[in-house]
Image (tube, helix red, strand yellow):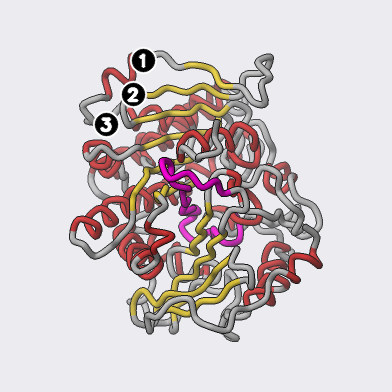
Amino acid sequence: MGRLSFFLVSVLIALPLFCGHSALAAGTEDGSEQWGYVEVRPKAHLFWWLYKSPYRVEDPSKPWPVILWLQGGPGASGVGLGNFLEIGPLDGDLKPRNSTWLRKADLLFVDSPVGTGYSYVDDVKDDSLPVKTDDEAAIDLTTLLKELFNGNMSLQQSPLFVVAESYGGKVAVTVGLSILKAVEAGELNLKLGGFALGNSWISSEDFVLSWGPLLKAVSRVDSNGLNDSNSLAQTIKQQLAKGQYLEAEQSWEELENMIRASSNDVASDFYNILLDQRNDPIISSTSSVASKATSVQRYSKHLYSFRPTGAEDDVSILLNGVIREKLKIIPNNITWGGQEDIVFPAMIGAFMKPRIQEVDELLAKGINVTVYNGQLDLICSTPGVEAWVEKLEWEGLKTFLSSDRYPLYCDGDESVTKAFKKSYKNLHFYWILGAGHFVPVDQPCISLEMIGNITQSPNNS
């Protein structure tokens, strides 16, 4: 689908899709896409975008799933990054993506928390409007889901799978418990299929403790760098034990700066241990529209300070240009990413807090939880993920840990191992080889097969 046909199918629907006074929505003429705003609190508005899959298979015994994608940051835009740079139908140049996850499910992108992407608050100077915690972000998302699912029989028949990346994983497990509470109270009508936590920032302590040893093992730091890293990581561990989350975040920034200096800028975004800062996988995977200089500068707070002076963010150009023209409902005073500066500062006190307990609670309730991680990620490293998984108190953990894992391949080619998988009951773990932080970008084939297995899509044979 080229740029011209992209606009030809994007005719605005004049009638609202929802009857609630707090919702504004539109979509394409053929109904394949819907998008809109939900006022989740007075003066706080979340933007969502739903794609209906053209690959849908009608199977009464196995309903077609919906994936809710939650981006990281906090403050990164799922509508912008997850959609156009990772798993949506079109890439950053508005060309078809062969590996789109629409092959396995409908896709729902939400710019969360408020202030992210197209989402906004009416008054950026009102400190009460941005969310301060993962729980507050989860409540807003639950409010949005009530507006979308309640009264929509089509969505209610589809199991919802929450798939998260990076900091989005913390919000995902928190919103999971919020969703279950709302369903049990009869306030939300949906079927929860499960959760997939991709390179997720679940336990900051376990990640920072892993950084030095991992970088030493691949020769990006020497013994001096290892000792310096371990020393700062221990300081962070002590601060977290005392509940000093703001101090721990400051030490985390100090640790990142130290690692950059001692490793000669190992991917200054910390997203791939084998790359220098100019070779980010998302940046190198896109060309004209998705910037080779700054396309992921919005992904996390520590990236922002490394944005080249005066550089234009071409993802921003895309979202504030042709995409805004397509959507038509973005308020005149709102730009994509225009309120990003309010998001992280508001949540800074929550950033370093772990969410292992929430994973435990979901597992104890019998909810399917999948953990997947790119082998080459640093910020949410696989050793760090393994460490927090081993801290779970779930009754099946001992058997899970002692179980064998098995290799996975792609397209019938068993000459190249693409991943390993281990499962026991409702806990599943994928080790994705050759991938950094952005697994769907680095390994699109195995990622697509994995998400088909997670969602049990009818065409996943």
- Give the residues drawn in magenta, as a range: 56-81
> Do callouts 1 and 2 mark residues in contact (Cβ within 8 Å)?
yes
Q: Amino acid at mark 2?
A: Tyr
Is residue 110 or residue 335 the one in the foreground? Answer: 110
Say the numbered circle drawn on residue 42.
none
**Residue 141: x and y, percent?**
37, 63
**Residue 298: x and y, percent?**
58, 59
**Residue 415: x and y, percent?**
68, 14
Residue 151 as seen in the image, left or right of residue 50: left
* Mark 2 Cα shell of 10 Å, populated few (<14), some (14-19), many (≥20): some
Residue matched to label 1: 403
* Element class at badge 1: loop
Residue matched to label 2: 424
Residue matched to label 3: 392
Q: Amino acid at mark 3?
A: Leu
Residue 398 visible from this viewpoint: yes
Residue at (57%, 59%) from the top-left corner? 51
* Element class at badge 2: strand
Establish if 385 lies above or below 246: above
